[in-house]
Amino acid sequence: MKRNLPIAAGAALLALSVSACSGASSPAAPAGSAGTADSSQTSPAGFQEQHKGGTLRLQAKSGDGTLDPHINYSNGNWQIFQAMYDGLLAFKKVGGEASYDLVPDLAEAMPQVSPDGRSYTFTLRKGVKFAGGGEVTADDVVASFERIYKVSGPTSGTFYAGIVGAAACVKKPKECTLDKGVVADKAKNTVTINLVEPDSEFPLKLALPHAAVLPKDTPDKDQGTKPIGGTGPYMAVSYDPNKELKLVRNPDFTEWSREAQPQGYPDEIVYSYGLTAEAAVTAVQNGQADWVFDPLPADRLSEIGTKYASQAHVNQLSAFWYLPLNTNLAPFDKPEARQALNWAIDRQAVVKMFGGANVAQPACTLLPPGIPGHADFCDFPQPDLAKAKDLVQQSGTAGQEVAVVVSDDEVSKQIGEYVRSTLEQIGYQAKLKVISTNIHFTYIQNDKNKVQVSVSQWYADYPAASDFLHVLLSCASFRAGSDSSINISGYCDKDIDARMAEAMTLDRTDKNAANAKWGEIDRDLTKASPIIPLFTPKQVDFVSSRVGNYQFHKQFFMLVSQLWVK
Amino acid sequence: MIGYILRRFGAAVLVLFAISVLVFLIFFATPGVDPAARIAGKNADPATLEQVRASFGFDQPLPVQYLMMMKHLFVSHDLTSFVNRGTLVIPQIMDAVPVTLSLVVGAAVIWMVLGVAMGTLAGAMRGTLVDPLVMLLGVFGVSLPVYWLGEVVNLVTQKELHDSVFSWVPPLGYVPLSQSPGQWALHLLLPWLTLALLYAGIYARLLRGELIQALNEDYVRTARAKGLSERRILIRHALRCSLIPIVSLFGLDFGALVGGAALLTEVVFGLPGVGKLTYQALQNLDLPVIMGTVLYAAFFVVLANAVVDVLYARLDPRVRRA
C-alpha cells in the first residue's frame, strides 16, 4: 500500500527519543484464552470498567474516501474500520509484535486447511450480530465474498484473484457467482473457500478490511458515505468527508473474543475533518482534540519531543522510502549505472533530511525489519564515491542527462536535490523536476512519462515478503502505458520471478526455508538495484494529555477503540 | 432594457461554458491524473481497472464525458465526487455556502465601516497629522498577507496566550448560526477581522483619494458658496460621489469572495466553506467538485458584475441617462 503523505520532518526531531518505541503503555496486553475468551472475565488484562465512557476526538485534514470497507484502500479508514467490521480472521488487536499474529474472528477457530492447501474450511461463531441487523450467517459470508468482485474492489483482481471463479468475476462483476469458490454449509454452519492454487498468504488477506463480512443485503455498489452495519463494537451514524465521521457504540455488540475484537472504551468516537495539521497539533496541546492523523509538521516536532514528550509515541513502521530507477531507460538500463548510484547514496544523510535517527533508520534491504524474510545484510553500507564513479565509467553512461522527479513536499524535495547533486558528482548531468504531490505517485508509474529516477514510499498491506518484492518488482506488476503500474522501475527478470514463485510455494510447507529464500532474493535484487532502499520511517503519534492505554498495532497503527479518555 | 438583460445573460452563459470546458480540458491534459487509476486503487489488476473505467464512463470520448458531467450537474443534479464516492457535489457546495456567506458578509460589514470611516477621516483631515497616520494604518493592513496574519492570530490566540488573555477564544471551526448565534459570532470574530483588515486598508486609501478629488470639484465650491455646513458638504455631496468607485469595487470583491476567494482565510481557520472545498478538491484532484466549485465561483463573479452595474446607475444618475 502506498501512503499518501510522507511524514514531513525537518532536522528538528531530536528529543523524541524520550518516548521512542513506546508500544503499549498499558498494563500488559490482553492475555486472551485462545480465541474463545469469554467477556465476563475481568482479569487485570481484561476490560477495565473504570476507563469506559467519554468521547474520543480525532482530527484529520480531510475525510479519507468511501466508508465502504470492500472498496476503501487508505490507511486512515483502515485504522477506523478495525473498530467497525470483522472478517473471518483478524490480526490480533494488541500492541507490539503480537499484532501480526492471526486469530479467528467471525470464525470459531483457525480454518481447517485441506492437504493440497487449496481449501479452507471455517466454522462460524454463533450469536455475532450486525449492527441493526440479524445474526451473521454463512450466507452473509458468501454474499460478502461475491461483493468484493461485484463492486470491483481495488484488490479483487490481486489479493482475492485466487478464489475459484474469481477470474470470471473480475471480468464480469455483475454476473459474479462463487458457487464453487465460497461454499456455505448451513447445517454445519461452515464456509469453505476453494482456491485455484494454494496461497500461503491467503489467511493474511482474509484479515484485511477488503474481506470484511457485511450483511448479505448490502447493495452491490459503493455505499460511499452511507454507513453499512458491521459487527464491530462501533457503528457509524453519520459521515461527511468534509466535516466529520461519528461513531457510537453498536448496541448489538457483545464481546466474543478479546484478541480478535475487544470492546472499546470511549462511548463515542468523533473524527473531525478540516483543520490543518498545524492547527490540529495546537488543538491537541490545548486539550480540544485527542489525536492528529496527518503527519506532524516539522516545525512542531522539537516542541512535541520536549515539552509534550509524554504524549508522543514513536513506533517503527513496516515500510520503506526508496528510489525507483527506470530499468528500461538510459542510463539506468545498465546495472552498473544503478549500482553506482546505490554506492553513492549516503543513507545517513537522507535520514537526517527526513528528521533524524529518531524517526527513521537507514535501510540496507528492500524488506524492512519485522517483515518475514528480512535478512540482516548490508551490501552497500557506506557511500563510496570513487567506486561509484568507476562504475559509471564502466557502464559507458557518463555525461548522460538524468532528471530526478519528486513530489513537492519538503522532505521529497530535499532528498531529490540530494540525489541530483550525487548524480552530478558521479558523472551525470542531473536536474531536479518537482511536480505536485497530488499527481506524483500516478505520474511516476506510467512509463509514457519517461521518468528515470524518483522518490517513492511503500507501506506493507500485510506482513509478507511478497507484498514488497513481488508487488514492486515482478514482471506482472509492470503495465505499459498505465497510471496503475506499481513496478515503477519496469524491472522484469524471469529468473527472479521464478524464484519468487518458488518461495511462495515453499512458504506453505516450510516457513523458515521460504523466509531464507526471500532473504536471498532480496539480496540479489538489492545487488541488481532496480530500486534503491533509503530508510525505514517511524510513525509519530501525538495524543492529548487525557488519553491513556495507547497501543500501536503493526498492521493498522494506533488502536483507536482501546484509547482511554476517562 | 430587456434586450440589455438578455445580452448580458447570454454573455454570462458563454463565459460559464468556456470556463467549464477549460477546466475539463486542463484536467484531462495533465499527465498522471487518470481518474480510473485513482478510483481503482493502488496496484489494481488491469481487468479491475477496465471495469472501473467503464462503470464511470471514462472509456467514452471526452466530449461525451463532458456532456455527461454537465447532465449530472445541471439536469439530474446527482454529480458525485470521484474521491469521496457517494458524496453529491451540489449538496456539498450548498452546505459550504452558508459558511462562506457568514464569513464574507461579516467581514464585509467590518471592512466597509472601517474603510469608509478611515477614508473619510483621512480625506477630511487632510493636512493634519491624522491623515498620514490613518493611511499608514491602511498600508499596514494591505501589506499583511491574510494566510500569514491568520496563522499569527492562531499562534497568539490558540497557543501562546491561550491560557491567559485569549482563554475565551473557542477552538477553530464553525458553528451554524441556527445552532447558536452567540457561538457563531464568537467562532467567526477573528476570521472576520483577519479578512477585513486587508480590504479596509484598500478601501480607506481609495476613498481618501476620491474624496480629496471630490472636495476640489466645482459643485463643492458652489455648495460652500450657498452656505452649506462643511459636514453636510462632506457627507451629502462629496462622499456620495466618492462612494461610486467604492461600490463597484465592493461588488466585485464581494462576489469573488463569496465565490471562494476567501479560500486562505477558510483554510487557516478551519472553516468548511466553498474556498476550503475547492482547496480540498484541488488537493486530491476531484474533478466533479472542482468543476462544481469553479462554475459556482464564476457564476458569482458574473452576478456581482451585473449587480454592480445596476447599483452604479442608482448612485450616479449620469450612468442611467447614458
Image: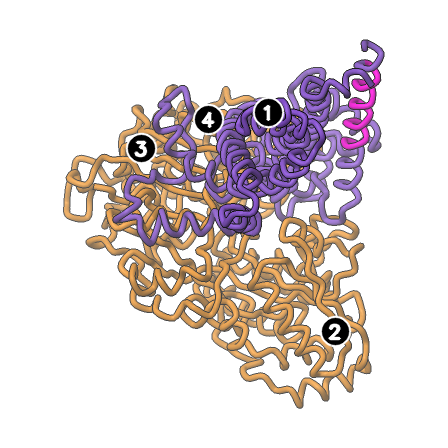
Chain colours: A orange, B purple
- On whether disc 3 and disc 2 are found on a single subunit, the reply is yes
Q: CA distance from mark 4 to mark 2?
A: 50 Å
In this picture, residue A381 sits left or right of residue A253 = right
Mark sitting on residue B88:
1
Chain identifier of the residue bearing label 3 in the image: A
**Above or below B173: residue A174:** above
Q: Residues within 10 Å of mark 3 (few under 14, many from 20)?
A: many
Is A442 included in the stretch rendered in magenta? no
- Label 2, on which residue? A430
**Rounded to the nearest whole Å, what is the CA distance between mark 3 and mark 4?**
16 Å
Magenta stretch, main secondary structure, is helix
SS category of the residue bearing label 1: loop
Where A160 sits versus A234, above or below?
below
Q: Position of residue A490 (x, y in %)?
A: 73, 61
Callout 4, which amino acid?
Pro
Tag 2: amino acid: Ala
Say which amino acid is labelled 3.
Answer: Glu
Q: Is residue A209 visible?
A: yes
The chain that hosts pointer 4 is A
The magenta segment is B6-20
User: Is B78 situated left or right of A452 in this image?
Assistant: left
* Separation of residues labelled 3 and 1 (CA atoms): 26 Å
Residue B190: where, in percent of width, then height?
Answer: 42, 39
Q: Nearer the viewer, mark 3 or mark 2?
A: 2
Q: Position of residue A470 (x, y in %)?
A: 61, 58
Q: Quadrant of residue B68?
A: top right
Q: Above or below — where is B73 with respect to A154? A: above
Tell which tag, 1 or 4, sits nearer the viewer.
Answer: 1
Q: Which mark is residue A227?
A: 4
Q: Position of residue A208 (x, y in %)?
A: 47, 43
In the figure, is residue A101 to the left or right of A114?
A: left
